[in-house]
Image: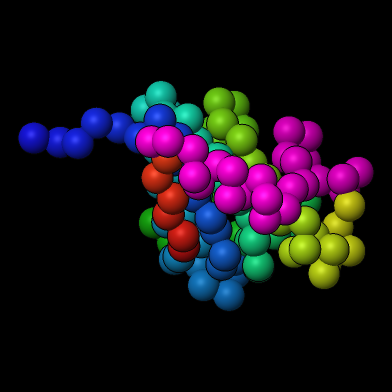
Amino acid sequence: MLAPMARLLVVKATAGADAPERCSQAFTVASTAAASGVDVSLWLTGESSWFALPGRAAEFALPHAAPLPDLLDAILATGRVTLCTQCAARRDIGPDDVLPGIRIAGAAVFVEEVTTEGAQALVY
């Protein structure tokens, strides 16, 4: 018997072009969960931070993987995407730089989400 679905799935993507398979897995899992009706929160941290910027997801390519812009759009359509505050600052990314629908927030918001009753957190 399968366990009941978490009310919130928090996916933290830490990899970008530096680890393309891990990056793709994070976006694939988050978008699949969102398409299945799960409340999804995707956090862009580390090298995945760059995907908060317009056009950057389109530069990512991995053979036999869904296009990253499609996965990101699917998550934005029903879930939340958050860029880590410190990661954004280290890359000189501000609120006016990111794609519509992406927020910038810090550790306190992340902790709030992952400690929500019924939440499941995954880190890639």
Furthest residue in direction bottom, as rendered:
18
How is the rendered protein coloured? rainbow
Foreground pick, 97 / 64: 97
Report the residue at 51% width, 67% height from top.
Answer: 20
Foreground pick, 5 / 15: 5
Furthest residue in direction left, as rendered:
1
Residue 23 can be seen in this image? yes
Residue 67 vertical position relative to residue 8 in the rendered view, above or below: below
- Residue 89 horizontal side relative to residue 82, left or right: right
Report the residue at 40% width, 45% height from top.
Answer: 120
Picture coordinates of residue 63, whole percent (x, y): 44, 61
* Residue 103 within the segment the image draws in magenta: yes
Magenta-highlighted residues: 95-118
* Residue 105 within the segment the image draws in magenta: yes
Report the residue at 64% width, 41% height from top.
Answer: 81
Residue 69 vertical position relative to residue 47 in the rendered view, above or below: above
- Residue 39 horizontal side relative to residue 80, left or right: left
- Residue 84 horizontal side relative to residue 78, left or right: right
Foreground pick, 27 / 105: 105
Picture coordinates of residue 89, whole percent (x, y): 84, 63
User: Could you tell me which quadrant the N terminus lies in?
Assistant: top left
Report the residue at 53% width, 55% height from top.
Answer: 12
Quadrant for residue 64, please give it: bottom left
Picture coordinates of residue 121, whole percent (x, y): 44, 50
Picture coordinates of residue 65, whole percent (x, y): 43, 54
